[in-house]
Amino acid sequence: MAYLAVVLLVLCSCGARRTVSPEYRSFPQVQVPGMYTTREEVVDYVAAHFWDAYFAQSGVTDSAAVLGVRKAEVEQALANYIELQDNLPLATARKNMKGLFAKVEACQQADTGSLFYLRFTEMVEKYLYDPNSPLRNEDLFLPFVEELAECPFTDTLMRTGYRYMAAMCALNPAGSPAPDFRFKDISGRIHSLYGTKGEYTMLFFSNPGCDACKVMIEDIDSCPSVSKAIADGRVALVNIYIDQEIDKWREYEPTYPRSWITGYDWLYVIRDEQIYDVRAIPSLYLLDSEKKIIMKDAPTERVLHYLDGKLLENQ
């Protein structure tokens, strides 16, 4: 990805740091040993050692800084780090996330009165779990929140909530079979998720008239390779309404693209039995030809980028 090249260029640069206020330090760059020469080796090394130099130094944590580095700079570093992990095998990325938590915990242990643990874990939750985050990724957040739920530095009253988050992140992970369900179309005909065919399935949970849903529909429609693959049947887009205002859905249904498979869960299985954790609308899943989950509640841009590449590969 282009952004990855930029990230690596910035991280591996040995140029002079920009000047900052004396009370704060810059986020330290990763210095890659000369023995690592291939792109894959560099990415693996940077992803594994991204935070080493940051945690090697102390610094104040207040409203403006986290461990001596300005908060905005730490947030940008965290965003870069998440993007790096997205390019690694999931098992490796999860190991790195667990290692990051261990560093956070050790840092707090060294100064138990610091606000560092609270501030840093809030940032990770914001970027990886908030439904509005363009970098959200429950598969990456899972190893972090599992540790967060049991760590002695976590407020006792918050542990139950974190345990629930961990359970939801563990639901339908990447690589697992997507739960099947039945739904009705506007004519009352019954379909099932597994009855749809395609090299890929985009499972889209939407509400009629929802502004964010309209934006997602426009984004999908404006991606030529994906919209063509939907029209040609290579990609099945299953658009499902899971709430109770069926009359409102019926009125709105004709506005959805006709190449989509649109219906509603008349049994409310998805919502009531929580076979999918639909935390916010819209929510988008990507499945393979066998209905195994590739991406769970993923940002639209990430899904479209992945599909665009795969569809071009398989032409």
Image (tube, rainbow, N blue to C red):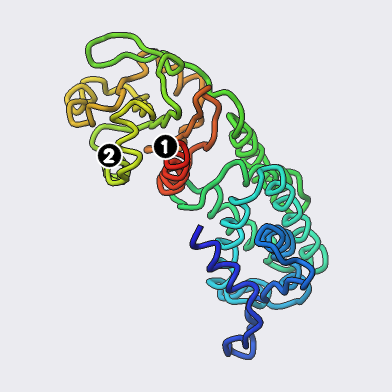
Specify the quadrant of the image occupied by residue 137.
top right
Q: Residue at x 64, y 87 (%)?
A: 23
User: Which amino acid, by three-letter code, is at mark 2?
Assistant: Cys
Where 137 sits versus 179, above or below? Answer: below
Query: Disc 1 marks which residue?
Result: 315
Q: Residue furthest top?
A: 189
Up the image or down, 124 lies above or below 257; here it is: below
The alpha-carbon separation of the residues under discs 2 and 1 comes to: 34 Å
Instruction: Give SS at disc 1.
Output: loop
Instruction: Look at discs 2 and 1 and give the one toward the viewer.
Output: 1
Q: Dot 1, crowdedness within 10 Å: few (<14), some or many (≥20)?
A: few
**Kind of residue indicated by mark 1:** Gln
Where 163 sits versus 153, above or below?
A: above
Q: Dot 2, how many residues are within 10 Å of its Cα: few (below 14), some (14-19), or many (20+)?
A: few
Nearer the observer, 110 or 314: 314
Q: If you read the primary sequence from the N terminus, does the residue marked by circle 2 or circle 1 appear first?
A: 2
| Closer to the camera in the image, 207 or 160 | 207
In percent of width and height, residue 239 lies at 34, 27
- Residue 142 appears in which quarter of the rendering? top right
Drawn side of residue 124 relative to residue 132, left or right:
right
Q: Residue at x 42, y 24 (%)?
A: 198
Q: Residue at x 60, y 39 (%)?
A: 165
Query: What element does badge 2 sit on?
Result: loop
**Given contact means CB atoms under 8 Å apart, are the residues at marks 2 and 1 in contact?**
no
Q: Mark 2 — residue?
A: 210
